[in-house]
């Protein structure tokens, strides 16, 4: 298990995002009302950039074709059954926000 620090506690206001490079993988870290989410920056449908995709009720929408992904599970909820988005667990560890990797 590896914890990668990607931000400091308090660095992001609710709704703010931060682009993170995880050993060549582009990830978006965002702070929701009740915690943090980390997800692959590029849509699994046709690789559009999700950095500014609207997030509503724990789901991010891709502006390219409108697919929506649950940020807890990565499941494609619109349309159902689309390829899932990669989501990564985030933990606050002391003063750091960390992405947990099962390496
Ligand atoms: S590229 Fe994201 S929905 Fe098509």
Image (cartoon, rainbow, N blue to C red):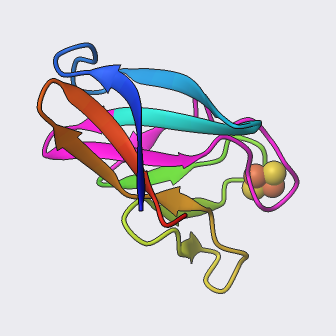
Q: Where does the C terminus fall, quadrant-wise?
A: bottom right
Query: How many numbered marks are there?
Result: 0
Dominant SS of magenta comes to loop
Q: Position of residue 86 (x, y in %)?
A: 60, 62
Q: Nearer the viewer, residue 57 or 32?
A: 32
In the figure, 2 relative to 19: above or below? below
For the point 30% across and 27% down, the residue is 15
- Identify the residue at the far right of this view: 46
Q: Nearer the viewer, residue 89 or 75?
A: 89
Location of residue 79 in the rendering, given as x and y in whole percent from the top left corner: 65, 76
User: Which is nearer the eye, 54 or 87?
Assistant: 87
Quadrant in the picture for the N terminus:
bottom left
Q: Which residues are magenta?
A: 31-56
Q: Residue at x 43, y 24 (%)?
A: 17
User: Whole-percent x and y of residue 69?
Assistant: 53, 63
- Name the residue rendered at 42%, 42% in the picture: 55
Which of the 4 image quarters holds residue 63? top right
User: Within the magenta stretch, is there residue 30?
Assistant: no
Does 58 appear above or below 17?
Answer: below
* Res 32 → quadrant: top left
Please give left or right for residue 98 compared with residue 54 in the image: left
Q: Quadrant of residue 6?
A: top left
């Amino acid at each position: 298990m590896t914890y990668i620090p990607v931000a400091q506690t308090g660095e992001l206001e609710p709704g703010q995002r931060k682009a993170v490079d995880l050993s060549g993988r582009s990830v978006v870290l965002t702070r929701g009302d009740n915690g943090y989410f980390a997800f692959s920056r590029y849509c699994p449908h046709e690789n559009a950039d999700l950095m500014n995709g609207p997030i509503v009720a724990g789901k991010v929408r891709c502006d390219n074709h409108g697919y929506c992904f649950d940020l807890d599970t990565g499941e494609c909820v619109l349309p159902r059954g689309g390829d899932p988005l990669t989501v990564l667990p985030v933990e606050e560890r002391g003063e750091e926000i960390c992405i947990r990797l099962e390496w």
